[in-house]
C-alpha cells in the first residue's frame, strides 16, 4: 500500500472511530435523559430554578434571596433563563429541554476533548480521551442534573482547546476568543479564575520575551474583560460595590475548616466573611498543625477523588459496571499530571489539574468537585497510555 493510500486509510479510521464514539456518547446521555426518573429538584438545583423564575418575572438576579445579590456568578442561571424563556415555564419548568441541551453540550465536550488530545500529541491520544469521556459514568449522568458542571465543562474545554492553539500559534483573534471562553467559564464557576495566567508564565519562561508574552496575554484579557464587564457594571450599579466574581466564597471555605467534619454542626456565629474563615483556619493550624495539615492535603484529596460522583438509584444499572474506570483514571491521570511537569506539550494541562485541585482543597470537600478536573486527568491518562503502548521512542 502506497503512502497516499495509507494516509487515506488512517484518516478514514480516525473519522469513523470518532463518529462511533460521538454516537455512543449521545446514545448514553439521551438514555439517561429519557429512561431515568428524575427526583424532585432539591439543593442547588431547586435554588437555581427559583432564581431563574424570579429573574424572568421580576427582573433581578438573587440567589436564595428576594433581593438582588452576587452570591453566585450568573452564567448558569442565565443559561437556564434562556431555555425557560424559549420553552416557557407557566406549566412547569422546562427541565427536560435543559437536560437534552446539556446532553448535546456534553457530547460536544467529548468532541473538544478529542481535539485537545490531538493537539497535545496525536489522534490516538484524542480518540482514547474521547472514548473515556464518552463512557465515564459521571459525565453521562451529570447531563440530567440541573447543575453547573456540564455547561461549565463544555465552555472550559473550548477555552482549553483555544488556549493550546493560542500557545502554539498566537494571534489576535484566537487570543481574544480564548479570553471570551475563559470568561464564560468563570461566569459559570469562578474557582478557576487564577489559572488564566499559567500559560503566559510558561510562555515567558519558554521564549524569554516579556513584550511578546504581555502582548498575547493582554489580548486574552481583552476577551475576558468583554465577557465579565456587564457583571461588574451590574454589581456596581445594583449593589453599589465592585464584586469581581461572587460573594459566597467564605461559606464553602468555612464548611471545609472542620477536619473530617468534626464540629461542623457547631459553626461559630461570628464568622461572616472570608477573612473571618481564614483567621478560624489559622487558629486551627496553631492548635493542631499535623491534624489540620493532614486534613487539608490527603484528607480532602481522598474525599474529592476517592469515589466517583454517581449518585443514581441502584435500580438503574446503566454504566455501574464501569465504576472501576474512575480509579484507573485517577491513578494514571495523576501520574500524567506529575510527568507533565517535564513535558512542554502537556505541562500547563498538568499544572491546571494540580492548581485546580489545590483550590478545591480550600473548600468543603465532596466528590462532586472532582468533576471539573476529570477532563484534565482523562487527557493526561490518555497521553500516558499512548506513551506506554504506542510511543516507539520511549
Image: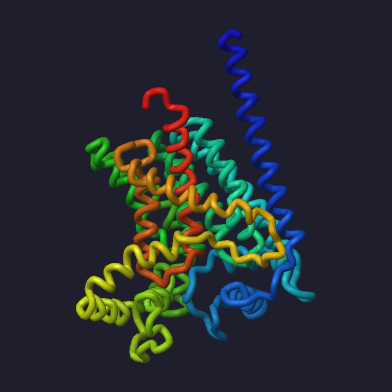
Asked if one can make out residue 313 in the rendered structure from this viewpoint, the answer is: yes
The C terminus sits in image quarter? top left
The N terminus sits in image quarter? top right
Please identify the quarter of the rendering in which residue 280 is found: bottom left
Q: Nearer the viewer, residue 338 or 26?
A: 338
Could you tell me residue 267's position as x and y percent? 38, 87
Seen in the image, is 10 located left or right of residue 168?
Answer: right
Please identify the quarter of the rendering in which residue 53 is found: bottom right
Could you tell me residue 139's position as x and y percent? 59, 55
Q: What residue is shown at x 45% (from left), y 74% (from top)?
A: 235
Could you tell me residue 143's position as x and y percent? 64, 58
Q: What residue is shown at x 57% (from left), y 74% (from top)?
A: 44
Q: Nearer the viewer, residue 69 or 159?
A: 159
Q: How is the image coloured?
A: rainbow
Q: Which of 323 and 111 is in front in this view?
A: 323
Q: What residue is shown at x 46% (from left), y 76% (from top)?
A: 237
Q: In the displayed orientation, state which residue is furthest to the right.
A: 91
Q: In this view, does 385 lie above or below 329?
A: above
Seen in the image, is 177 located left or right of residue 43?
Answer: left
Q: Is residue 42 above or below residue 21?
A: below
Q: In the displayed orientation, state which residue is furthest to the bottom.
A: 269
Asked if one can make out residue 55 in the rendered structure from this viewpoint, the answer is: no
Looking at the image, how many numbered discs can be counted on the residues? Answer: 0
Q: What residue is shown at x 52% (from left), y 47% (from top)?
A: 158
Please identify the quarter of the rendering in which residue 245 is found: bottom left
Q: In the displayed orientation, state which residue is furthest to the left.
A: 286
Amino acid at each position: 500500500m502506497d503512502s497516499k493510500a495509507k494516509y487515506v486509510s488512517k484518516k478514514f479510521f480516525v473519522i469513523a472511530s470518532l463518529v462511533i464514539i460521538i454516537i455512543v456518547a449521545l446514545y448514553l446521555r439521551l438514555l439517561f435523559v429519557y429512561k431515568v426518573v428524575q427526583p424532585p429538584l432539591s439543593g442547588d438545583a431547586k435554588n437555581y430554578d427559583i432564581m431563574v423564575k424570579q429573574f424572568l418575572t421580576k427582573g433581578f438576579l438573587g440567589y436564595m434571596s428576594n433581593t438582588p445579590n452576587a452570591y453566585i456568578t450568573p452564567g448558569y442561571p442565565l443559561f437556564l433563563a434562556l431555555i425557560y424563556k424559549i420553552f416557557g415555564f407557566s406549566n412547569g419548568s422546562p427541565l427536560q429541554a435543559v437536560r437534552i441541551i446539556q446532553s448535546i453540550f456534553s457530547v460536544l465536550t467529548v468532541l473538544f476533548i478529542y481535539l485537545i488530545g490531538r493537539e497535545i500529541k496525536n489522534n490516538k491520544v484524542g480518540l482514547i480521551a474521547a472514548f473515556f469521556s464518552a463512557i465515564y459514568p459521571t459525565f453521562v449522568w451529570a447531563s440530567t442534573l440541573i447543575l453547573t458542571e456540564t455547561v461549565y465543562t463544555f465552555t472550559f474545554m473550548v477555552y482549553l482547546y483555544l488556549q493550546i492553539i493560542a500557545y502554539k500559534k498566537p494571534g489576535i483573534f484566537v487570543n481574544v476568543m480564548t479570553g471570551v471562553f475563559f470568561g464564560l467559564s468563570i461566569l459559570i464557576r469562578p474557582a478557576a479564575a487564577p489559572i488564566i495566567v499559567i500559560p503566559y508564565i510558561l510562555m515567558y519562561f519558554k521564549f524569554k520575551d516579556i513584550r511578546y508574552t504581555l502582548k498575547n496575554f493582554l489580548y486574552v484579557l481583552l476577551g475576558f474583560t468583554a465577557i465579565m464587564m456587564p457583571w461588574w457594571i451590574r454589581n456596581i450599579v445594583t449593589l453599589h460595590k465592585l464584586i469581581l466574581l461572587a460573594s459566597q466564597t467564605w461559606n464553602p471555605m468555612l464548611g471545609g475548616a472542620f477536619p473530617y467534619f468534626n464540629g461542623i454542626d457547631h459553626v461559630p456565629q461570628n464568622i461572616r466573611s472570608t477573612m473571618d474563615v481564614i483567621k478560624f483556619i489559622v487558629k486551627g493550624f496553631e492548635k493542631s498543625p499535623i491534624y489540620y495539615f493532614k486534613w487539608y492535603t490527603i484528607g480532602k484529596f481522598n474525599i474529592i477523588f476517592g469515589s466517583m460522583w454517581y449518585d443514581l438509584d441502584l435500580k438503574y444499572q446503566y454504566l455501574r459496571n464501569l465504576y472501576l474506570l474512575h480509579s484507573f483514571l485517577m491513578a494514571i491521570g495523576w501520574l500524567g499530571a506529575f510527568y507533565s511537569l517535564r513535558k512542554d506539550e502537556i505541562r500547563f494541562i498538568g499544572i491546571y489539574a494540580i492548581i485546580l485541585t489545590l483550590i478545591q482543597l480550600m473548600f468543603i470537600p465532596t466528590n462532586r468537585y472532582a468533576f471539573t478536573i476529570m477532563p484534565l486527568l482523562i487527557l493526561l491518562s490518555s497521553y500516558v497510555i499512548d506513551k506506554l503502548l504506542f510511543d516507539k521512542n520511549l
